[in-house]
Amino acid sequence: MVLVIDPQIAGVSGDMILCSLVDLGADKNKIINGIKQSEKFFPNSSITKLDFNKIQKHGIQSVELILEIDENVHERKGSEVKKAIIDSTKIIKFSDKAIVFAESCIDSLISAESKIHGISEDDVHFHESSSIDTLVDIIGIAIALDDLRLFDEKIVCLPISVGSGSVTFSHGTMSNPASAILEIFKTSNLIIKGNSANDELTTPTGACILVNLSNNPIEYYPSMKVNSIGYGA
């Protein structure tokens, strides 16, 4: 079996990947329970609502993540976020491949920030990625991939839309795609492309998840018999 990821138009984010896996049939209750077990490893952050809903997006029925959080944290050390993810994998019944995947995702984000700012990985601080939703995305996707038994399948990825224009965040306003996105994809064979959206279509967390999920770029859909489809809003 082959899993085809198609971010050609809408780009990619962590919750979009997670929701598409739920739409493919991953057990949402297993994902929610696993994330709630992980919540305690993120001090000063709590999840007040977590669910997945079916919605209409541009006329297509898809799945969206409903996430409400209560937190008063504006930055965290990358090592703190990594520890929270590692601690989470120890209490949830993950396969060995899921553990490696989860740790690799956060390692990619830390490594990119380290190279951009010219500092050691131990000194990396997250701003936007310091929120608990980073843990929700990485842990949730690892649970979903395990549940669907997709770690043992071939995963391919079509060109990834990154948008255009500029993006404003903790370090100011930069050209889009920002440095973190470029640094993350530099270590991968995956292909990125701009379009006229004039917005950030691919997030750093989504990029990190994607490069650790697949290193098999394709330009067109492969010859295949379609078995199931998942749309992540």
Image (tube, rainbow, N blue to C red):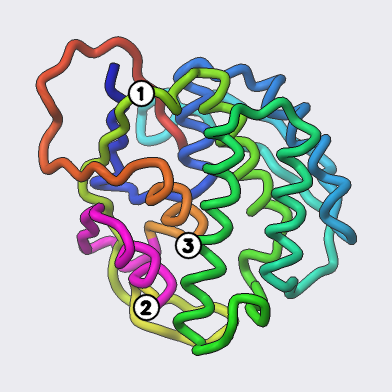
**Mark 2: which amino acid?**
Ser
Residue sitting at x 48%, y 41%: 16
Magenta stretch bounds: 179-200
In this rendering, which labeled residue sits more in front, label 1 or label 2?
Answer: 1
Q: Residue 29 occupies which quadrant of the picture?
A: top right
Closer to the camera, 74 or 144? 144
Q: Counting residues from the N terminus, which is met first, the one under dot 1 or under dot 3? A: 1
Q: Is residue 77 above or below residue 38?
A: below
Residue sitting at x 39%, y 77%: 179
What residue is shown with label 2? 166
Q: Is residue 24 left or right of residue 49?
A: left
Residue 185 on the magenta span: yes
Q: Counting residues from the N terminus, which is met first, the one under dot 3 or under dot 2? A: 2
What residue is shown with label 1? 153
Residue sitting at x 82%, y 45%: 39
| Residue 204 marker | 3
Residue sitting at x 30%, y 10%: 227
The spot of residue 92 in percent (x, y) is 75, 30
Closer to the camera, 203 or 98? 98
Q: Is residue 145 left or right of residue 190?
A: right
Mark 3 crowdedness (10 Å alpha carbons): few <14, some 14-19, many ≥20: many
Q: CA distance from mark 1 to mark 3?
A: 24 Å
Closer to the camera, 95 or 76? 95
Mark 1 crowdedness (10 Å alpha carbons): few <14, some 14-19, many ≥20: few
Tell me the SS state at disc 3: helix
**Mark 3: which amino acid?**
Pro
